[in-house]
Amino acid sequence: MVNGKPQPGRRYGRASGKGYDGRQARRPFDEDPRALMSKPESHLEMAARHIAEQQDRIARQKRLLAKLRRDGHPTEQAEDLLRDMERLLLQMQRELEMLSS
């Protein structure tokens, strides 16, 4: 963008590989694709990975919620989202237990 105006032919946002804040976006396909495809993931491994990723998302949401509180912003929606995320995590953990047995 120049002077706050988009430039023709220039891609912005996630498609450009940059996040909306201008930093480099994290993308799982940035790793060597051969390493990702070398061994198929079992259902148990996938469920465990999803749980770990959800735990990371919850930790991030908690940090964002703390920042909102610290800066004096409303937190009701962020708290609702956190509760939903935690409920989903419990559900995922129960499903992993069922898969494991």
Image: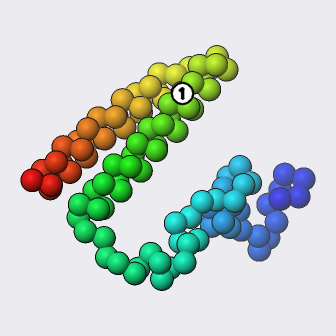
Asked where in the image residue 70 lies, by quadrant, the reply is: top right
**Image coordinates for residue 14, horizontal then vertical, percent:** 62, 61
91 is higher (above) or lower (below) than 82: below
In the foreground, 57 or 6: 57
Which quarter shows the N terminus? bottom right
Q: Point out residue 60 in the picture as x, y percentages from the top left corner.
A: 52, 38
Q: Is residue 79 left or right of residue 41?
A: right
Please say if 55 is above or below 19: above
Vertical order, 84 against 36 (above or below): above
Residue 3 x/y as whole percent = 90, 53
What SS does tag 1 mark? helix
Asked whether the viewer can see residue 13, the reply is: no
Q: How is the image coloured?
A: rainbow
Q: Between 20 and 3, which is closer to the camera in this rendering? A: 20
Residue drawn at 23 percent across, 64 percent down: 43
Mark 1 crowdedness (10 Å alpha carbons): few <14, some 14-19, many ≥20: many
Residue located 24% across and 44% down the image: 93
Q: Residue at x 54, y 27 (%)?
A: 65
Residue at coordinates 30% horizontally, 54% vertically from top-left? Answer: 48
Asked if 5 appears above or below 73 in the picture, the reply is: below
Instruction: Residue lying at the far right in this picture: please name it.
Output: 3
- In the current view of this chain or complex, which residue is farthest to the top? 72
Q: Which sits in the foreground, 82 or 52?
A: 52
Image quadrant where residue 23 sits: bottom right
Residue position marked by numbered label 1 in the rendering? 65
Left or right, residue 101 beside residue 11:
left
Residue 15, given in percent of the width and then of the height, sits at: 63, 67
| Count of numbered circles in the view | 1
Q: Is any atom of residue 92 visible in this view?
A: yes
In this picture, residue 19 sits left or right of residue 75: right
Query: Which amino acid type is marked by label 1?
Result: Leu
